[in-house]
Image: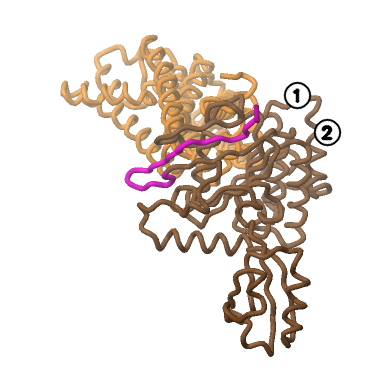
Chain colours: A orange, B brown
Amino acid sequence: MSPRLVLVIASLTLREIARRRILWVLLGLSIASVVLVGWGVDRLVTFARAEDVDELQVRIGVSQVLILIAFMFSFVLAMSAAFLAAPAIASDVETGTVSAMLARPLRRAELVVGRWLGLALIVAGYAALSGLLAIAVVGLVSGHTPPSPGVAIAFLAFQSVAVLTLALALGTRLPSIAAGAITVVLFGLGWFAGVLSSVAVVFGAAPLGALGDTVRILIPTDGLWRGVIYGLEPPLVILATAGRNAQAMRANPFFAGEPPPAAFVAWSAAWVLLVLLAGIAMFRRREL
Amino acid sequence: MTDLAIETRGLRKQYGATVALEALDIRVEAGEVFGFLGPNGAGKTTAVKLLLGLTRPSGGEGSVLGRPLGDLGARRRIGYLPELFRYQAWLTAREVLDLHASLAGLPSNRRRAEVDRVLALVGLVGRDRDRTGGFSKGMQQRLGLAAALLGDPALVILDEPTSALDPVGREDVRAIIRDARERGSAVLLNSHLLGEVERLCDHVAIVNKGRVVAAGSLAQLLGEQAVRLHVTGLASAADPSTSPLASFGPVSVDDEGWLVVRPVDPERIPDLVAAVVAAGGRVHAVDPGRRSLEDLFLGLVRDDNADNATEPADDATAPAA
């Protein structure tokens, strides 16, 4: 594999997304939502303080609002990643652009990896920028900063890269709409499995838990989302749940008492690599 | 040793039960313009994709520029204009060419000059900063041709290069193809416009139903010189036994009522006209010429389609060595 050609394709991908204005639309919408969030949190905090609510409670309230915002944001990010990545190869095959490019001394693997690299840079950069902005604005208006914003943003970016890898790999074989739709469904399924296995723990329904856990390993996006929550969860909340209501809190899909295990993080990285390799293998076998 | 740009032996492609290409045998010499003809669905585009390694053959073998099909090294020296395609609409013409120059591995210090050269060649100077999304089909085709000619490739594969062009554009493309040959490129020209192929090509292969039904130089294929005459006042002329033209060659009447002598020695055409006049005939028009490629093509394809597919092609037009 030639690194030069991978970079040529990656920079082509960056240029494509910048030119197609979708990135600017997303960025504009994100900035608008951050402004809205800042305004909302400011109202909330001002109102609570005027009512003499305990400062600790205000902080905890803001931290939970931030987690909810991050959830919404991770969803938007996953959708964007899916719909940016699904057509990256699929639509070039549909328009015949890819035949003109692959007649050159360009390996199919170089095309897929170059596309992946360009998209991953965009999506991770976008996650980092908008995430930091949201955390900073909330910090500014409420005085609350999450314990490890870097961890939260890294997991947010990781989750979006996992989603984009899946959409890109499916798009090497399927039409772009199908690849995008399947990715979104699988992402939703992963999240649902996460909720299901939490509920199963509370009710002691072991088979259900096992099923949920299996899905969460096959689609690691939900596990990565737990990493985002962990980075945003104040230690106080974690301590408070260590008591007798711990089981109930664990069923909450917006709570994480511990970071994702290192083995899970390693597995997620391997999963991204395996999905990418599967995409390359499918694309190499494809008749153009 | 003669350098071959393309050689295939029994190249075959099957998609499930559908045979797209039954057995392709062609030889394209280095530096020649080779016409690759056939009706829709004959397997021409499939053959081109096999040559470029975009699909894998189901059987047979082939080489391009002395390397196996799809070889990266060979692809460095091939320019390709696909038939149905769109370039990235959000790139300018110059950026498309720059991308292809860089994919082809052209050294970066030569790229700009080379892009300028091909832009001038296809007449896109002044439009090079425009996005290709706003280009007409004809301009897209010119851009595709420019991309195919980047870096003087040893082999240029053009799949219907003039389908979207007006007559002026077609004439330009003919000049461009001749120029490419002069610069040493072999050109595989896949076209429906038979007049164009006839004017440009050194050798031709006609494919039908996935195999070659005729191949050779134009002189070999269209070799027989003929003459057509529009004559009145000479009723006996068409009868071979009494015709004053019988001594010049076999005489027939075509569907427009013209007399046709084929084959004929071109040197004797003035004598032939004099003989008609001497016999009392009035000559309105004389059309010297050989069989057109179009006649040959239509005849071959119709005969082939009428025949049972298992019968071999006519010997006289069998693939030339």
Q: Residue at x 52, y 18 (%)?
A: A149
**Residue A276 rendering spot, x and y as whole percentages:** 45, 24
Q: Residue at x 76, y 83 (%)?
A: B278
- Amino acid beneath label 2: Ala
Mark toward the start of the polypeptide (1 vs 2):
1
Picture coordinates of residue B121 (x, y %)?
A: 80, 45
Q: Which residue range is magenta in the image?
A: B1-22
- Look at mark 1 in the image and give the residue it sits on: B107
Do we see residue A29 in this rendering?
no
Name the subunit of mark 1.
Answer: B
Q: Name the image quarter holding residue A36.
A: top right
- Please tell me in which quadrant of the rendered image residue A220 appears: top left
Residue type, mark 1 in image: Pro
Q: Is residue A54 left or right of residue A3?
A: left
| Outermost residue toward the bottom in this view | B233
Which residue lies under the disc numbered 2? B113
Of residues A226 and A104, the one drawn nearer to the viewer in this rendering: A104
In terms of secondary structure, where does tag 1 sit? loop
Instruction: Please tell me if label 1 and label 2 are on a single chain.
Output: yes
- Residue B209, compared with residue B234, is above or below; it is above
Dot 1: within a 10 Å radius of its alpha carbon, few (fewer than 14), some, or many (20 or more) residues?
few
In the rendered image, residue A243 lying in the magenta stretch gets the answer no
Residue B7 percent across, percent down from the top left: 55, 35
The vertical placement of A43 against B82, above or below, is above
